[in-house]
Image: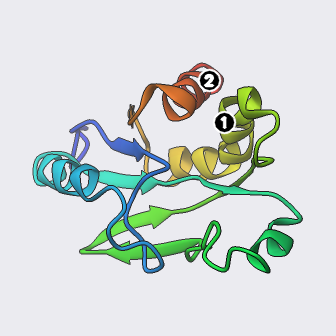
Amino acid sequence: MVAADSRPRLVVFSSLFPSKVQPGAGLFIRERMYRVGKVLPITVVAPVPWFPFQGLIRLVRSNYRPMPPKYEVQDGVAVWRPRFLSVPGLFRAWDGFFMALFCLPTMLRLKRRFGCDIIDAHFAYPDGYAATLLGKWL
């Protein structure tokens, strides 16, 4: 029996993707990937940096790391936004690892539901490194 849709399924993995709180971020990524989405099924995982005390920084810089919704649908495409631990100014070398680790539960769910075959990462670090780890783990 042949599957109804045997095309590869693509997960767009980019920490820079437009959201309600940052509509101008990564427009080139969205435009490029929506064109790919006309040919292949896509879903988006757009990790968001977070750390427990960033609310304190917002007391001084009100627009510091605005938090988009954890899930939204844009033009029929599902966009997941898992948070990952990222301490500002410190431990930046760990961002790729933490991005992969904190996105793993979302990616596992997508693999079960969506059947992702390809991870299309944008930017070498931390996104590309995290996507490489996720590809190995999955």
Q: How is the image coloured?
A: rainbow
Q: Nearer the viewer, residue 33 or 104?
A: 33
Q: Which residue is depicted at the point 60% across and 76% down?
A: 63
Q: Which residue is mark 1?
A: 100
Residue located 67% across and 40% down the image: 99
What amino acid type is highlighted by mark number 1? Ala
The answer to whether mark 1 and mark 2 are in CB contact below 8 A is: yes
Counting from the top left corner in percent of width and height, residue 16 is at 43, 52
If the image is split into quadrants, where does the C terminus sit?
A: top right
Give coordinates of residue 102: x percent, y percent.
73, 46
Dot 2 crowding, Cα within 10 Å, few <14, some 14–19, many 20+: some
In the rendered image, residue 39, in percent from the top left (x then y), is placed at 11, 47
Q: Nearer the viewer, residue 7 or 65?
A: 65
At mark 2, the secondary structure is helix
Q: Name which residue lies at 52% across and 51% down.
A: 110
Q: Is residue 2 left or right of residue 11?
A: left
Image side of residue 100 versus residue 115, left or right: right
Q: Which mark is residue 133?
A: 2
Instruction: First in sequence, mark 1 or 2: give its number.
Output: 1
Q: In the structure shown, which secondary structural element does the residue marked by tag 1 occupy?
A: helix
Residue 8 has which mark?
none
The answer to whether 2 is drawn above or below residue 56 in the figure is above
